[in-house]
Amino acid sequence: MDADLPEYPFPQPAALEPPPEWDALRAGCPVSHVRLSSGDEALLLTRYADVRQVLSDPRFTRLLDADGAARVTAQESGGVFGAEQASRTPMGEAHQRWRKLVGRYFTAKRMSAMQPRIAAMANQLIDDIVAKPPPADLVQSFGFPLPVWVICDLLGVPDADRDRFSYWSDTMLSLTRYTQKEIDAAQLEFGEYLWRLIEAKTASPGEDLLSDLIEEFSTIELIGTAQGLLIAGHETTANMIGKMVAMLLADRSRWESLLDDPSLIRTAVEEALRFDANPGFGMPRYITEDIEVGGVTLAAGTTVISSMGSANRDESAFPGADGMDLNRSPNPHLAFGAGPHSCIGQALARTELQTALTALLDRLPGLRLAQAAADLPRREGLIIGGLEKLMVTW
């Protein structure tokens, strides 16, 4: 074991600043050996072209529980990338069938139809915020509740159970924050909850995604689907709402540009996704044959981590990559991945982010940070990066 390998994920100088290793590795070592939280070794890719190639190539598999695959997390189970989750997730042709069936609920047209409900939820949360004197923590009062409300609405989960979903999501995304005992208990609790929910919907179907899929999938597949959608549909978007607002308020001329010209909201959301300096772990893949990437032959049995955050800061793909350009178009960022495993919920995420930003601009035009951007606290020990708090005033 090489004790001198850099520890990954890399620490950040501040919550909105990228790790300096990104620039250094893209320039000098775009295929780099790193040490994961588990102690295992993996290869890290940091250039846009290489990351896009890997994410689009089906030979880079999701077999992260294969013998010899690097364990991503510090826990034995591997969390969301572990064997238990893999056993509930369709693979190969079954995965393509899963994407086809589930994907029909996440078209841009369907998400557009959901937009008024999302806007109503956002405005209800803002009503609660302004009912109290500032400052407020936008992460806990807005960023996290909104996506969990939306995903619970989509799955047909009762409103009273929203807070429990937030905790279950956190445990499944743990790198180091939770113990294996806590993770096992939460996953068992979540699985039992979903089992009872699916039984209830089998007996009395509603107008929701789980009810519609009962005839297509087994209960185990439905549980895996709900877990995957919770993580993709709640945690990632919840963190992104806070980071997006922080980026726009860190240089308040950005916020003012959107107040002056709301037509920029769509491109501003895309640029926030690209510019995100704290996207979390990245996308792990496992290869079963030798494959060349970036002029380097990667050996069979290697675990490869694609850093979408670093790729999105690659000057060769994005001129002026270290600056935030709210007019940037086209913007072929990799925040949602690429290829056959790109994020199935990206239309929903875009709708939520655009709707959340529109509501905040309309209702709180005077919004500003209540602390220096350099002092914003990061969420630590989770696979997905974000802010622990975002204190704002108005």
Image (cartoon, helix red, strand yellow):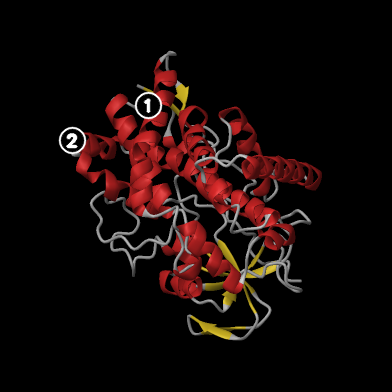
Residue at 40% of width from left, 42% of height from top? Answer: 352
Q: CA distance from mark 2 to mark 1?
A: 21 Å
- Number of the label disc, if any, that sits on residue 186: none
Residue 260's disc is: 2
- Can you say which quadrant of the picture contains the N terminus? bottom right
* Residue 224 in which image quadrant: bottom right
In the rendered structure, the answer to whether residue 226 lies left or right of residue 233 reads: right
Residue at 56 percent of width and 29 percent of height: 159
Seen from the viewer's position, the closer of residues 35 and 88 is: 88
Where is residue 228 shown, x and y percent of the image?
A: 59, 53
Which quadrant of the rendered structure holds the C terminus? Answer: top left
Crowding at label 2, few (<14), some or many (≥20) Cα neighbours within 10 Å? few
Residue 310: x, y in percent? 46, 61
**Mark 2 belongs to which amino acid?**
Asp
SS class of the residue under badge 2?
Answer: helix
**Residue 372: x %, y % from top left:** 43, 32
Point out which mark residue 123 bears: 1
